[in-house]
Image (cartoon, coloured by chain):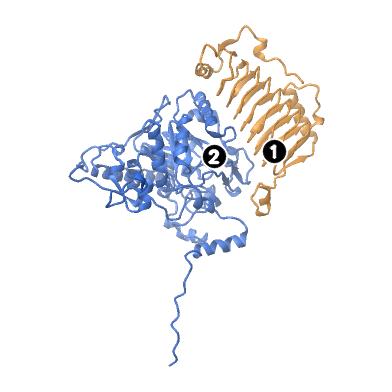
Amino acid sequence: MTYRNPPTTPRKSATFDDYTLSEIRRAAATGIYDIRGAGAKRKLPHFDDLLFLGASISRYPLEGYRERCDTSVVLGSRHAKKPIELKIPITIAGMSFGSLSGPAKEALGRGATLSGTSTTTGDGGMTEEERGHSKTLVYQYLPSRYGMNPRDLRRADAIEVVVGQGAKPGGGGMLLGQKISDRVAEMRTLPKGIDQRSASRHPDWTGPDDLEIKILELREITDWEKPIYVKVGGARPYYDTALAVKAGADVVVVDGMQGGTAATQEVFIENVGQPTLACIRPAVQALQDLGMHRKVQLIVSGGIRNGADVAKALALGVDAVSIGTAALVALGDNDPRWEADYNALGTTAGAYDDWHEGRDPAGITTQDPELMKRVDPVAAGRRLANYLKVMTLEAQTIARACGKNSLHNLEPEDLVALSIEAAAMAGVPLAGTNWIPGKNGF
Amino acid sequence: MPATTMSKAEREQGHARVFDLSEHSLRELNQALHKLTPGSNETAWEVLHPRGSHSVAVGVDQPVTIDVRGSVGYYCAGMNDGAAITVHGSAGPGVGENMMSGSIVIKGDASQYAGATGRGGLLVIEGNASSRCGISMKGIDIVVHGNIGHMSAFMAQSGNLVVLGDAGDALGDSIYEARLFVRGKVESLGADCIAKEMRPEHIELLQGLLDKAGVTGVKASEFKRYGSARKLYNFNIDNADAY
């Protein structure tokens, strides 16, 4: 018997992992960067790294199924004559018609309305489907101004000036030609079939002083009735929040890097912006420093998935959260029932993110008339409402356990962190210690 | 410099509803204008002492005439939908932004982003316009008697920009289907913008715009036409250097 030296196990590089290698090969073959939808997929410090303490001798809980735990929130009371009152502090984030199909937009409106919350237009203007089916509709005011007009501005319940979004702070958008149907082209005043670039900067203002004048114009056009939100990507949350408040915002929306996009470069999504968890405390701090916490409301989005995430965001000082990706999943996005179709596109349910290509098997991120039939707006709206209900009940369960009769009474003192990173970002103690990294000089 | 015709409100002077911004607030002015309903008798308005106020006469949606006696700040006549608004002075940034229909005449100069994202109607600037004139325009017609600054008609989607004088750097960068007519010199063209042939239909279109804007003594044949080369309409890596 001949002796063989024991072989080593084949070892792949942690740096050059399978995904990285595949991306290098893809780039070499095509000469173009990878564009995809959704938000950051890398592992990031997140709400999972926080835990609630619950009640104990010093804090007594509320009875789970008997004692009231308020979930309502008023948005826009600073300047608007007609602030928005929502039954739950979970709103639907802006997603464009064009990026999403008409039935998908209708389903978002139906689900939000059943749940007593708001939904939001996107970079493509307001459609009759969503206005008709949304009791409370936030109208986005975007750099491209696609579909912008004073009639819709006045039909809206609130206006959201979009400065940036978490998936791509500082980036514009691109709706590829294959998604430009006649209707989408008409709403955007562009020829059918060409790529539609959405600008990254507003065409008629730059900087916080101009923004203040722009907000004044929007208020004057709408007779000071509508709440005006300012949405920023998670870039410099302290300063962006402070400047939005200075510019006159009623509500500030901060979108972390897990927040989705319809189509952005992979390199942008994964490498620009800050995680949602890292954005919250600086934004809250800015409001507190200005004496505007709870006067100007703060909405945070990017990776909100369940009632625990909602409760944790609110405990850190947020007034409401917003969901996009999770809402699409509730409608049916990435559903394993379409696995064969996902496989045919070279992917699998749960990983599909080529939303810009318009071939979505679930019929949501498409303008293909056949595919969009897969979304029944009534049933999908019902699923979204169910999901929002579950999130709300979960958040209430946690709040009652912490002795709170309103979700808004949750506080940072109810939380600890499981990692030093999360403790530093959230400004709560590392579990089992009284150490908040960065506080008191160490 | 060619003159525009006298506005309707000027002809009807004495019957106009006068609104003095040194006595009343901007909010009162805009709300009074928004309360107008179709068939209202208050068809002529005169705004005194604007003193550079921002957002003068924004969001008007009735076919009234408004004469603003003096210079205005940002976004004057923003989102105008049907009114004929004349500023007897100069206008700050974003005059007539996102106009839907109607007309706006600026007797003096206009600052940056004049007519930005405008969807319809006619914007006439009798003086010069600064940078980014007609940025992202979506159907508006803009006629500038003087010169326009750099990056004008950036990402212009639709509509017509007519310049009797010169245009600054990077005219029509990333332009879509808007038509640009310049009588004087163009400092430089932006990405994907090229000089195009003036065919008879363009001469006719331009002459119509000049007439509508009250421009006299200038022939359409004196202009050059610029528009999209349409090379950036669908992303192609071989065009990356153009971005």
- In the rendered image, the vertical position of residue B180 relative to residue B37, given as above or below: below
Is residue B201 among the parts visible in the rendering?
no
At label 2, counting other C-alpha atoms closer than 10 Å, the crowd grade (few under 14, some 14-19, many 20 or more) is many
Q: Identify the element where label 1 is drawn.
A: loop
**Which residue sits furthest left?**
A57
Is residue B159 among the parts visible in the rendering?
yes
Residue under label 1, please give it.
B172
Colour of the chain lettered A: blue
At label 1, counting other C-alpha atoms closer than 10 Å, the crowd grade (few under 14, some 14-19, many 20 or more) is many
Type of the residue with mark 2: Gly
User: Relative to residue B234, is residue B223 drawn left or right?
Assistant: right
Q: Residue at x 46, y 57 (%)?
A: A351
User: Relative to residue B213, is residue A121 drawn left or right?
Assistant: left
**Which residue sits furthest front?**
A441
Q: Residue A288: x, y in percent?
A: 37, 34
Q: Residue at x 45, y 43 (%)?
A: A255
Q: Nearer the viewer, residue B31 or B22?
A: B22
**Which residue sits furthest top?**
B14
Q: Residue B79: x, y in percent?
A: 57, 27
Mark 2 and mark 1 residues within 8 Å of each other at the beta carbon: no
Residue A393 in which image quadrant: top left
Residue under label 2, please give it.
A124
Q: Identify the element where label 2 is drawn.
A: loop
Letter of the orange chain: B
Quadrant for the N terminus of chain A, please: bottom left
Type of the residue with mark 1: Gly
- In the rendered image, the vertical position of residue B69 relative to residue B206, given as above or below: above
Which numbered dot is residue A98?
none
- Measure the alpha-carbon separation of dots 2 and 1: 23 Å
Q: Residue A356: x, y in percent?
A: 54, 50
